[in-house]
Amino acid sequence: MHISRLLTTSSPRLTSPGQPDKHLAGLAMSIHLRAHAFAANPLRGLAGSASAAAAVSSSAAADALRSLLDGADAAAHHHLSKVLPFRRGRPLTRSSDPPAPSPSSSSPAPPPSWRLAWLPPSRVPGVPSDVFVFLGSHGSDGDGEEAAAYWAVDVSEIEGARFGGAGDGSAFVDLRTLMVAADWRDKDAMGELAIAGHARALLEWHSTAKFCGACGAKAVPTEAGTRKQCSNESCKKRIYPRVDPVVIMLVVDKENDRVLLSRQSRFVPRMWSCLAGFIEPGESLEEAVRRETWEETGIEVGQVIYHSSQPWPVGPNTMPCQLMVGFFAYAKSLEILVDKKELEDAQWHSREDVKRALTFAEYEKAQRSNAAKVNQICKGAERGGQSISAEFSVESEEAAPMFFPGPFAIAHHLISSWAFEGGPKVPSSFSNL
C-alpha cells in the first residue's frame, strides 16, 4: 500500500520527531490502497491457495466439517477447519497490545492490532453442520500439507453458547468499528476485514432468505451454505446470495474546478459525501448515475467515467451486501435544486476547500483511536460511543469545517483522487485500485 501526502504547510518535513500528530494535522492526504476495504479477500477463488489443485471444494470441506463435529479424528485434524462465530452481525475478534517502544525512541507507540478469533470446531459444540457457511480455503503451499477450510457460523440464537469475554481477550465487535480500526498499511488486517465482510454478508443473507420467493416453501442451505434451494420437490428453485448494486458518483464542474457534494439528514454534523443511489431494473450504470443526480440535485450530467467498485457489507441487514460502483460524472448544468426528501443539502465545493477538508480530517488518528477502542472492548472495558465527527479533530481542537468518509469508503477515494490528481486524464475507464 502506498500512502502519499502533500504538504499544505510551508514545512519541508513530513514528520517531526516527538510531534507526529501535530505535523500530520497540516497534511492533505491522498491515500492509495491495493484494494478497497472489504475487497481482495484472501479466501476467495484461487487467491487462497498455491494452485487450483490445492483448493478445498465446498463439498469436501462440508464432509470434513461434519466428521470433526461428530468427533471423528477431531484431535488430529482440528487444524484443517477454522470457525469464525458471529453474534448479531458482529465477528468474534481478538486484540493485542502493541510492543512497548524503546526508551530511546522518539516515535509514538503503534496502536493495538486486531485479528479475527478463529476457533476449532470443537469450540462450537451442539451446532448443526448445515448452519455453517463455507468461506474458502487457505494455507497449502504445495509441500503436501492440506489447506485449511474456513467457516462462519451465527451463534446469536444458540442457547448456552459462550464465546469471548475479558478472560480470553476476545469479544464480538461491530464490523464498522473494525473497518475504521483496520490499519490500511497492514495487508493481513485488510485481508481479515474482507473475510469478515464476506462472512457477514452470507450470514445476514441466510437470516433473511429463509423461504422460497417462488412458492413460499422453506429454503435450505446447499453447497456448504454458499447457496440455498427450495425444499418443495415440485419447485426446487436455486437461490443465490443477494447483492444490491449502487452507483456512487462525484459530480464535477470542470469549467469552475469544483465538485458537487451532499449531506443526508442521518450524517453526523459537518460530514459531506458523494451522491449515490440504487440501480433500477432495466437501467445501465451510466443511466443510473444521470437519473440519480438529476432526481436529487436537478443537475444534468453528460460524460460518465468509471473509477472503481467496492463491496459494502456494513449496510442494513435487509441488504446484506451492497456493491458500490464509483464514477466521475461531468455536469452539463450548474443550478442546484435539492430534493429534500432525499438530501438535507447539496453544494458546489472548490478544489481548495476539498483539499482543506482532507487536511483537517486526521484519518490516521481516527484509525488509532478505534484500534484502541477495539482493544478495550476485547478486554471487557467497552468505551462509550463517540460520534464519527469527534474522531476527526485537529491538534488545536479547532473543529474541521467539513470532512469526508475515511479511506475505508469508496467516496473518500473518488474525492481525494479528484482533489490531488484531477480525476481521469482520458475519457475512458479509470481506476487506480
Image: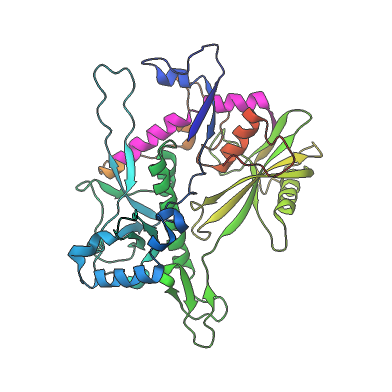
- The location of residue 61, given as percent across then percent down, is 35, 67
Residue 348 belongs to magenta span:
yes
Q: Residue at x 38, y 61 (%)?
A: 54
Residue furthest right in the image:
333
Q: Residue at x 39, y 48 (%)?
A: 192
Q: Is residue 402 visible?
A: yes
Residues 206 and 345: in front is: 206
- The location of residue 222, given as percent across then percent down, is 43, 74
- 126 horizontally vs 277: left or right: left
Residues 128 and 35: in front is: 35
- The location of residue 86, given as percent across then percent down, is 35, 57
Q: Residue at x 40, y 54 (%)?
A: 50
Task: Examine the residues drawn in magenta and state their main secondary structure.
Answer: helix
Residue furthest front in the image:
143
Q: Is residue 238 above or below residue 295?
A: below
Which segment is the magenta one?
347-375
Q: Is residue 137 above or below residue 271?
A: below
